[in-house]
Image: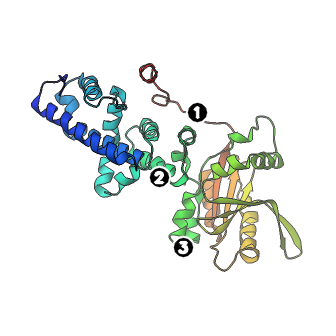
Amino acid sequence: MANLSIIDKEYVQWINDLKIRYRNSQIKASVKVNSEQIEYYWNLGKDIFELKLDNKYGSRFYKNLSNDLSVELSGADGFSERNLRYMKEFYSLYYQQVEILPQLVAKLCLVPWGHHRVIIDSAKFDGEKALFFVRKTIENGWSRSMLLNFIDTNLYEREGKAVTNFSATLPEPMSDLAKEITRDPYNFAFAGITGRYNEKLLKSALLRNITEFLIELGSGFAYVGKEYRLEIGDTENFIDLLFYHLNLRCYVVVEVKVDKFTPGDIGQLSTYVVACNHILKREDDKPTIGLLVCKNKDNTMAQYALEGSSQPIGISSYELEKLYPTNVEGLIPTIEELEAKL
């Protein structure tokens, strides 16, 4: 073994163990490249965290470890000082959840390391937030740029935040699942509207960008129609936007308002929800859900209005300007990382 930076029996033995683990992971890597790499990083981070090696060996520990692994594992990459620090943060972010859910490590191994670094930077030691983005990445197959986009637009803070009466109007577990498909506020920046506009212009802009609109609504939404015609008695009625949610197995009626929410908006939407149940809903479909998206709302007023409705309805607001992250540290490579890659 080459001369190491730290002359310590335990350290030397640990480096040798890391070499053995790495070679074993390389053998398996031909089948499962990403998962084996992530598991190796997890265990290396576990060693550093649980053995408190950065405290034991001082401020130059990560630099020394990086140099030693580069020598002992010749040709291997991924062991820069910065990446080694990420490995410790990776373990420390999730280890308490893993004690409760042992299968979590297997799920973490399904997410590429570049995604994990982005999540670590954004979560800032918030394990629940980190797991939220891990689950979303696995469920939706997000690229790193897509992950960054949803982090930038505060998806974690927005998802499931609409004011609803689902717990009182829908059976479990549908009530919880229905709550999860809502967001507040919705980010309609992709519509490209910057000046004066009305409801017709907004809805047209949303549908011109239907792919981005469906992405913002969330996974499971299938577009059915705009100004969807329903004949109720002797009267023609037109639903703003009609969707079918593939996971919930129900229709979702969406009404878009360019003004502040008023209690009177609930009556029209409730009528459309009931009409869909009578006219469109099939025997194996779940009850139709209504979603009212307004320019802004008073949450207390919205909750009071919903208590008077027997139909499952959610009320959200929307934004037309993109929200940018206040802290971009870790989202772009450092000068040292760029030089190392070159």
- Seen at 78% across and 60% down, the residue is 225
Q: At which x and y percent is residue 289?
A: 65, 66
Closer to the eye: label 3 or 2 = 2
Q: At which x and y percent is residue 17?
A: 20, 39
Helix, strand or loop at label 3? It is loop
Q: Which residue is mark 2?
A: 135
Q: Name which quarter of the figure residue 311 lies in.
A: bottom right
Q: Is residue 181 above or below residue 36?
A: below
Q: Quick one: 288 or 259, which is closer to the camera?
A: 288
Q: Contact, CB < 8 Å: mark 3 with mark 1?
A: no
Helix, strand or loop at label 2? It is helix
Tell me the amino acid under the disc marked 3. Pro
Q: What whole-number distance in Å separates the C-alpha atoms at marks 2 and 1?
A: 23 Å
Q: Quick one: 189 or 35, which is closer to the camera?
A: 35
Labels 3 and 2: the sequence-earlier one:
2
- In the image: residue 103, left or right of residue 217: left
Q: Is residue 43 above or below residue 220?
A: above
Q: Is residue 25 visible?
A: yes
- Seen at 51% across and 71% down, the residue is 172
Tell me the amino acid under the disc marked 2. Arg
